[in-house]
Each structure stands twice: as structure tokens, then as C-alpha cells.
Image (cartoon, rainbow, N blue to C red):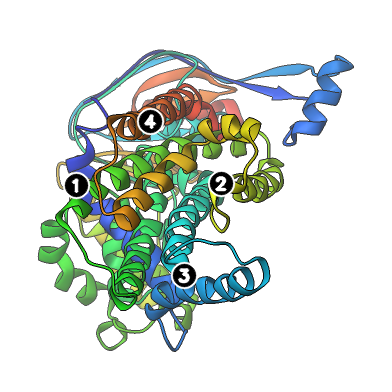
Amino acid sequence: MIELTHVTMKFRMANDRILSLKEFVVKFLTRKIKFKEFTALEDVSFKINQGEVVGIIGRNGAGKSTLLKIISGILMPTQGMVQVKGSIAPMLELGAGFDMDLTARENIFLNGAILGYSKQYLLDKYNDIVEFAELHEFMEVPIRNFSSGMIMRLAFSIATLVEPDILIVDEILSVGDTEFQKKSSKRMRELMSGGTTVIMVSHSIQQIRELCSKAVWLDRGKVIMVGECNEVCDSYMKQML
Amino acid sequence: MHPFLLYRRYSFLLAQLVKRDFKTKYRRSILGVLWSLLNPLLIMVVQYLVFSTLFRFDIPNYAVYLLIGIVFFNYMSEATSQAMTCIVQNASLINKVYMPKYIYPFSRVLSTGVNFIFSLIALYLVIISSGMTIRFSHLTLLFDFICLFVFICGISFFLATIMVFFRDTQFLYTIVITIWTYLTPIFYPESILPAHMMIVMKLNPMYHFIRFARFVILEGGVPDPKAWFYCALFALLSISLGYFIFKKAENKFILYL
């Protein structure tokens, strides 16, 4: 279960990002530090129940990614509260924390640990991960020697072969060659229908209609509409025309 | 939840990160891990040759005296410099995955700590080969190591924090380290210092950590309560200040990366 109450996220942007001490002192003394406030999310409240598949729609810059980051705990909201029950697997980027100098096997454990899984759990799932990625004979090879497709296959396998309570997906993931794309999108669908709470962002309304039961429509940081997926998508499309 | 209670939950992650740091450090080098042992020994040999023939300090067991200073100071400077850049270097990761931020500097201090243990092996090789005896009182060194470790953690938290907001910290810090090296009696005896410099020395935490170890190893005794007190004091001061500043700022890190 996820509940957001009156979440507001403001970024304070200095007119130039000051990253050196000298600059800071000079500008502070000459009173040239000005801050511009930018509100990425304003008074966002909604609730997601267990097992719901929720799509977040809206135009570029509507605050979709910021919202995902706040739910994953990466960003702290300026105001408001976020309550999350259950383990979260953020899939904002595949292969976060991969180290090119380590072997594929070592990277499975490193990446798995970063995503918050225990050693025992990864040991249990290890064979499934290798199986799914189809990289049996390459497990002891440093991944700097991998092709980018192979790296993505490995990353996808780690990210999806675990069963989190809440899955957060920024754009639907399909990687690799056609064969693997089929396999990976099938895997995503399985995950989504398997009782996991899913929050996904997509620009494809068709995909949202197909997969989601509920939708949230964001525009310039504000919630315009929350409700049954098709209803929200219909009004969104109407407004876009 | 209190971060030190969370340690159990994140111990696997910490172990993975330390392993990663250590493995990648020596990957593609022929001698590999041996470098952790060789490095302090080679520095010691060079400085020993320079200072025992050039300046002729009258210190018994000068090789051991020197190596204790080098091993301790190197751990401090290496760990803090590594930890300083850890938040900035892991910017992409911090943007994508949530994990408690103290993990980053803490894992760096731990992985350079593995190096420190190898340097200690080198130190003990020199102690044995110079004919000194290893006594039970050497166990008191554990207290010294813990204080040093806690002290380094504090400094690392502090540096990692200000590095996020002011990137010049890294350039400034190399100068600070150089000054600090000369202000610590690593290769020279304390006795050459004038009286007013001894006051400065008393404020230098590294001086106390190194003095503690030298007393135990070279004099073969247990240091007086004052020495224990100073080590603990600096460790606690550093960790409470460093951790406080880190905690205060950690939620803002992401806005500056």
C-alpha cells in the first residue's frame, strides 16, 4: 500500500549552480545569490492499494519521474508525507551500480545487493538469473568485454527475477534482440499480473490502457485526475486534441 | 530506524561494496594484493634511507618508529581522500536507487581498512625482523585502532558532505594533508620540536593515535590513562561532529549532484 498526502516538491535553483567555495564567497559578498523556486509537484495526494497496477500519464515535465523518485525514497518531499508498506524495487535504470571490471557473476551479487536483496535470496535465484539472461558461458568474464546487449540482458534478468512487493517502472522495458524483447516483455506482463503492486510511467497510452487498472494524470505538478484507467485515459486524450 | 541498527540489514551490501573496491583496485596488476603489503614497506625503505643517512635522527629502532607513523597516517589520508569523493562519484547511483547514504563513505573507510590491515602485517614483519618482542600489551593497540577508525569515519562524513556543495574541497584537502603530514611527527622525533609547537601537537589527533602505538610497540608498556583519554576524545568528537553534519545535509545531496 502506498499513500501520498499533500506531497509538494520544490527545487531551489540558484541562478547559477555554485559548486565552488570561491564562487560562493564572491557571490555571497556581492549579494548575487538569487534563488528561483521551481515547483515540480504541488499538493499531490492519492492512494494505491496492494496489487493495483497504476499508470502515471502526463506531458513532458509534468513531474512523473519526480513522483517515482519520491515514492522510491530517492527524493525527500519538501512538504507532505509518503507512506509505503512493502519492499520496493525501483527500475528507474537497469544495471545501476554495475562495475565494468567485475565479472558477470560478481556483478549479479553487487547489483542485487544494491537493489536490496539478501545473499541467500540471490544464491537461490542465481541459476534462474543466468538462465534467463542466456549468458552461461560468460559468467566469469569481466563485463567490460560484453556487448551492450549482453549487459542489458544481464541487468534485466537481475531486476525482474526477484519478486518485490512494489515495482516501479519508468517506461516499459524491452531490451536485447527481437527474441529477447519478446521474452522480456512477457516477463514484465507476468510480474504485473502476479499480485505485485506496480507503478509505471509510459508515454504510450495504448500500453497504459492494456496493462493498468488505475491511472493518475499529472500536469505541471498537479494531479488533474485519478481513477479508473480508461476514464482517465479518455479525458487525457480529449484534452490533448 | 537508527542507522547502526540498520547495519545488519545492509551488511551484505557493505561487504559487496568493500569487495568491489578491493578487487577493482588490484585488477590487472601482476602482484595484486601484494601491493598492499609492499607499498608501506617501500615507502619506509625510501624514507629510512633519506632520514637515517641525511638527518641522522637519534632514534632507536628508527625503522619501526618510522613505519608506525607511515602506516597510521597513510590509512587516515587514503581513507579520507577516498571517502571525500564518494558521494560525488556515485551521483548516478544516488539518483536511481535508494540506500542509506552513510553506506557510501563508510564502505570506503572499510575497504581502505583492508589495506591498513595488510600494512599492519608489513609492520609486524619489520618488528619481528628487527628483533623486538611482541608482548601481551600489544592487545591495547586494538583500542588505538578502533579510535583511529572512528576518527577517520567522522572526518570522512564531514568531507563527503562539504565536497557535495563545494567541489574545491578536494584541491584544498590535498594541501591540508601535506601540512598535516609535516605537523605530525612521522619521520622526525618529537624532541626536535620547540615548546610552543608541542601545544599545536597536543591538538593534532594523529599525534595521539601514533604516540599511543609507538609507546606500546617501542617502549613495550601500557600507555597512561591520559593517552587513552585523548584517543577516545578525538574519536568521539570527530564522529559526532561528522555524523551530525552528514545527517543534516544528506537529503539535500541529490539537489547538488
Residue sitting nearer the eye, B148 or B110: B148
Q: Residue B40: horizontal and vertical position, in percent?
A: 47, 70
Looking at the rendering, in which quadrant would you find the N terminus of chain A? top left
Between disc 2 and disc 4, the foreground one is 2
Question: Looking at the image, which residue is at 39% across and 74% down?
Answer: B37
Q: Residues within 10 Å of mark 2 (few under 14, many from 20)?
A: few
Residue sitting nearer the eye, B166 or A62: B166
3 and 4 marks in contact (CB < 8 Å): no
| Element marked by disc 3 | helix
Note whether A188 is above or below A124 in the view shown.
Answer: above
Between disc 2 and disc 3, the foreground one is 2
Q: Quadrant of residue B48?
A: bottom right
C-alpha separation, residue under disc 1 versus residue under disc 4: 61 Å
Q: Which residue is mark 1?
A: A193
Q: Which residue is mark 4?
A: B230
| Element marked by disc 4 | helix
Q: Residue A73: horizontal and vertical position, in percent?
A: 37, 32
C-alpha separation, residue under disc 2 versus residue under disc 4: 20 Å
Query: Which numbered marker is on residue B191?
Result: 2
Instruction: Tell me the subunit letter for badge 1.
Output: A
